[in-house]
């Protein structure tokens, strides 16, 4: 058994903003959240770009996306970057 976490930061965050995301992406993300995948958005980027992520299941990584990645790695998660 494994757990997956998706941490979005940088320019990629705009693609996950509900006003700009397409319906397929929103539907998939909703299903990911229902399946137990952690969806986190970098709180620092959200503030600097003055956007929010309203998609169901997303939470703000208030201390930043990179910090959230480090926290997850310290818990044994592997960092996979596309």
Image: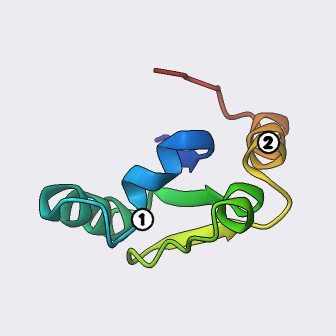
**Which residue is located at x 77 percent, y 49 percent?**
68
Alpha-carbon span between mark 2 and mark 1: 28 Å
Within-10-Å neighbours for mark 1: few <14, some 14–19, many 20+: some
Q: Which quadrant of the structure image shows residue 42?
A: bottom right
- Left or right: 48, with 18 as reference point: right
- Left or right: 81, with 47 as reference point: left
Q: Where does label 2 land, which residue?
A: 75
Q: Where does label 1 land, which residue?
A: 17
Which of the pair 42/31 is nearer the observer?
42
Which of the pair 71/24 is nearer the observer?
24
In the image, residue 56 above or below residue 30: below
Residue 8: x and y in percent read 56, 47
Q: Which quadrant of the structure image shows residue 77?
A: top right
- Left or right: 1, with 51 as reference point: left
Q: Which colour scheme is used?
A: rainbow
Q: Is mark 2 on a helix, strand or loop?
A: loop
The C terminus: image quadrant: top left
């Amino acid at each position: 058994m494994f757990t997956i976490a998706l941490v979005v930061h940088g320019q990629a965050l705009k693609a996950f903003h509900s006003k700009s995301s397409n319906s397929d992406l929103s539907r998939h993300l909703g299903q990911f959240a229902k399946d137990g995948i952690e969806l986190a958005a970098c709180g620092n980027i959200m503030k600097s770009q003055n956007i929010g992520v309203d998609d169901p299941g997303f939470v703000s990584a208030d201390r930043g996306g990179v910090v959230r990645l480090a926290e997850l790695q310290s818990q044994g998660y592997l960092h996979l970057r596309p």
